[in-house]
Image: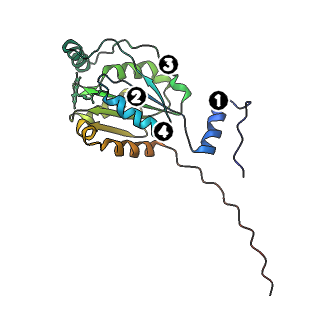
Amino acid sequence: MPPRAFSANLSLSERRCARMEVEGAMAVLIACYSLTGTTRTVVAELARHLQADIEEIRCDRYDVSFMGWWRAAADSWRGRRPPIAPAVHGAGNYELVVLAGPIWAWHPCPPLRAYIQRERATLPDTALLLTHGGSAGQQSLDELQAWVGRPPKARLTVTAAEMKSGTYAEAVAHFAQSVRPRPALVPVQPASVPEVTR
Ligand SMILES: Cc1cc2nc3c(=O)[nH]c(=O)nc-3n(C[C@H](O)[C@H](O)[C@H](O)COP(=O)(O)O)c2cc1C
C-alpha cells in the first residue's frame, strides 16, 4: 500500500498521524529550564535525535550570582513556585512533552514545577530528564513524576561526571530511542512467483 499523501484538508491530528505513518516521527516538545547551560546542552542533543521543538522556560527570579543561587536553593527547598513567562509553544499540540531541568537543593528546580502546575491539564504523554551534580537523582525524578501525576514514558538523569566524560550523549541517544514509537509494521506483498510447469 503506498504511503498516504499529505492533504491540506486533513486536521492537525490527522496530519500528525499521516506523518508518523510515513516517517515514523512524532511531534515532540522539550520544555526546558536551565540556569547555567548544562540542561540546555543535553536538551539540544535530545532535540537533534527526536527532531523536537524546544520550549525554554523563562524565569527572571534566579541568576548566576551569590544571591541568585541562594534564592534558587531556598525556593527549591521550600517548594516555592516562581513566576515564569508565558509559553511560546502549546504543550497540547504535541504527542509527547519532555520535561527537563536541573536539581536544586535535592529537588527538581522550581521553574519546572511552575511550568507543570500551569500546563498539567494540557500535557500529553511525558518523559522526564534532570541534570545534577551527583546527588538526589532518583528521588528528584520520583518527585517530578508525582508533580505530573502519571507515569512517564521514560526517565533520565545526567550527572556532571557524565557531562565531563561525554558519556551523556550515549545515555541521551538511548533515552530518545525509548520514547520514539516503534515504526509501524508494513504488510509485505507476496512476491509473484512464476508458475513452474513440468
Ligand atoms: C542552587 C543550586 C542547587 C543545587 N543543588 C544540587 C543538588 O541538590 N544535587 C545535585 O546533585 N546538584 C545540585 N546542583 C547542581 C546542578 O543540579 C547541576 O549543576 C545542573 O546540571 C545545572 O543545570 P543547568 O546548568 O541546566 O542550570 C545545584 C546547583 C545549584 C545552582
Beta carbon of the mark 1 residue lies under 8 A of ligand 1: no
For numbered disc 4, what is the local secondary structure? Answer: helix
Q: Residue at x 40, y 28 (%)?
A: 148
Q: Which dot, 4 or 2, sits closer to the camera?
A: 4
Q: Determine which residue is flagged by label 1.
A: 12
User: Callout 1 environment at 10 Å: few (<14), some (14 to 19), or many (20+)?
Assistant: few
Q: Is residue 159 visible?
A: yes
User: Dividing the picture into quarters, in which one does residue 9 lie?
Assistant: top right
Q: Residue furthest bottom?
A: 198
Q: Which dot, 2 or 3, sits closer to the camera?
A: 3
Q: Earlier in the sequence, mark 2 or mark 1?
A: 1
Residue 22 screen position, x and y as percent: 63, 44
Q: Using the image, tell me which numbered label, if any, was put on residue 88.
A: 3
User: Callout 4 environment at 10 Å: few (<14), some (14 to 19), or many (20+)?
Assistant: some
Q: Using the image, tell me which numbered label, if any, was put on residue 148.
A: 2
Inter-mark Cα distance, 3 to 4: 19 Å
Q: Determine which residue is flagged by label 4.
A: 50
Mark 3–mark 4 CB contact (< 8 Å) = no
